[in-house]
Amino acid sequence: MGVNDSGEITSSTSRMNLQMLQKIFVENEPDLIIDSYEEAKGSGRGDNYTAALFRLSLKGHTRSNDGKKKLRWERTVICKRLPDCKIKREAFKSEALFRNEVEFYNTIMPEFVAFQKRKCTASGQMFRAVPQCYLAQDDLIMLEDLQVRGFSMPDRQAGLGLEQMRVTLTELSKFHAVSLAYRKQQPAELARLTARISEGIFSKANAEWYKNYYDILTRNAIQMVTQTIPEKVGYLEKLEGFLSDCFGNMMELVSKESKLAVICHGDCWTNNILYKYDDKGCITEKCFVDFQLIRYGSLALDLAYLIYCCTDASLRKENLQNWLRIYHQQLVKSLKVLGSFHDYCTDEADLWLQIDGEFKRYARFGLGTAMDMLPISTCSSEEAPDLYASGSDTAATPPELNVPPNELCRKKMTDIVLELVDGGML
C-alpha cells in the first residue's frame, strides 16, 4: 500500500487522489486546499475481519481573512475498505456486508436523525453515538478518527466492565427506541429502509457456504464444554441439541417476527464500541462503529450478543437482571420522548415483561455468536488470523477462520452453556 506518482493511493479496491479528498472536505470548508496525505494501517490483527481499516492523515491550508496568510489545516480520518485480498473478500462475502454499512450511513442514520429532531427537545435525548461519516460508497467508507477525540477501544480479552455495560445498554436502548417509534409512526418508510439491507450471515442463501465453518465451530464448542464439565451429561445434551442444526437455529432466530423488532446493530462486541474517559476514568462519551451486520429483528438479538460475548459469568450472575432493567428504563424514557410508548405497552411493568420474555426467547442467539466470537476475542494478537496477509488464489472459497480455543475461551463457553440451561433458555 502506497502512493504513486500521480498522487493516487495504490489500492486494488479504491482509487483516491487529492482532487477526490478536496471535493469531500470543501463542502464544509470552502476555502480549504488539501496539499498531501499519508496512509497507515488502522487496526491490528484480531480487530477486524470483513473490511480493511486504514488511517489517512491529511494536511492542507486555508487563507486568512485578508488572503495573505496560509493557515495550517490537518485532519485524520479512518478509511474502511473491502479487503485487498480477493480470497478474504469473497470468503466473508464482504461486498454484501459493506453495502449494509453504506446504507446505514447514507440512508438509515440520516433518516433516524431527522426523525429524532422532530421529536426530541434536547440533544441528550437523541441517539447519535456514531462517528461522523464523510463518504460512503460501494468500496470505501470514510469516517472521523475517533482516536483524535480521545476515544479508545476496550481490551477485547478483558471484555466489558460494569460502567461500560451501563452506558452501552443505555445507548443501545436509545438506538432501538428510534426503530420502534419509526415503525409505528412511519411504517412505509421503515419498510423501505429495511428492504435496503440484507442479512449478512444467517440466511438460506449462505447456509451451504458457511456449512464447513459452522461445523468446525460446533465441534470446537462441544469439545470445550465436554473437557470442562464431562460429568454434566444433561447440559451437553441440550448443547448438542441446539448445535445439531446451529446455522438453521440461528436463521430462525434472526428471521422470527417480533413485536419488538428493530434495526439491530448486529455486531455488538468490544471492538465495535469505543469510549471516551475523563481524568477520573469515568466514561463521558461512547460511540458504536461497524454497522456491516445490521439486520431487522428482535431487539433481544443485540442484547444476547452483547451480554454473552462481552461479559464474564461472574458479572452476569450479579448483574444480568439489572442490565435488562437499565435497558428497560431507557427504553421507557426514549419511547415517551418519541411519542410511541403506548404503541407498545400499557405501562412500564408491561414493557418490562415484554423485554424480559424476549430476552429469554432469544438468549441462545448469544451462544451461537459466542462460538464464533469467543475464540477471536480471547486469543492474543499474535494468535489472531491476519486479515492483511496477501493471497494468490482467486477462486472463491468459504471462510476458514479457525482459531484454536484457549483455556479462557473454554471457561467462557462453558459458563454460557451452564447459564442458559439453568435459566431454561437452552
Image (cartoon, rainbow, N blue to C red):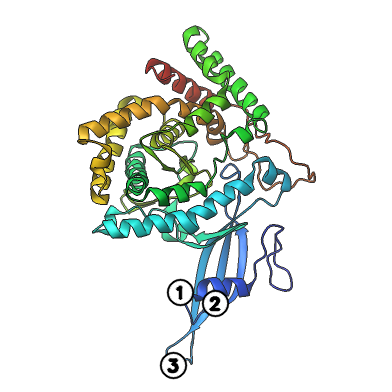
Residue linked to disc 1: 28
Tell me where residue 126 appears, x and y as whole percent. Answer: 31, 54
Q: In this view, does 41 lie above or below 23?
A: above
Dot 2 or dot 1, earlier in sequence: 1
- SS at mark 2 in the image: strand
Q: How crowded is mark 2: few (under 14 residues within 10 Å), some or many (20 or more)?
A: some
Residue linked to disc 2: 60
Dividing the image into 4 quarters, which one contains the N terminus?
bottom right
Gap in angstroms between the C-alphas marked 2 and 3: 18 Å
Amino acid type shown at disc 2: Gly
Q: Is residue 310 above or below residue 13?
A: above
Q: Nearer the viewer, residue 360 or 74?
A: 360
Q: In this view, does 174 lie to the left or right of 141?
A: left
Q: In this view, does 90 lie above or below 305?
A: below
Amino acid type shown at disc 1: Asn
Gap in angstroms between the C-alphas marked 2 and 1: 14 Å
- SS at mark 3 in the image: loop
Tell me where residue 191 appears, x and y as whole percent. Answer: 44, 47
- Image point (39%, 37%), residue name: 299
- Image point (63%, 31%), residue name: 207
Residue linked to disc 3: 66
Dot 3 or dot 1, earlier in sequence: 1
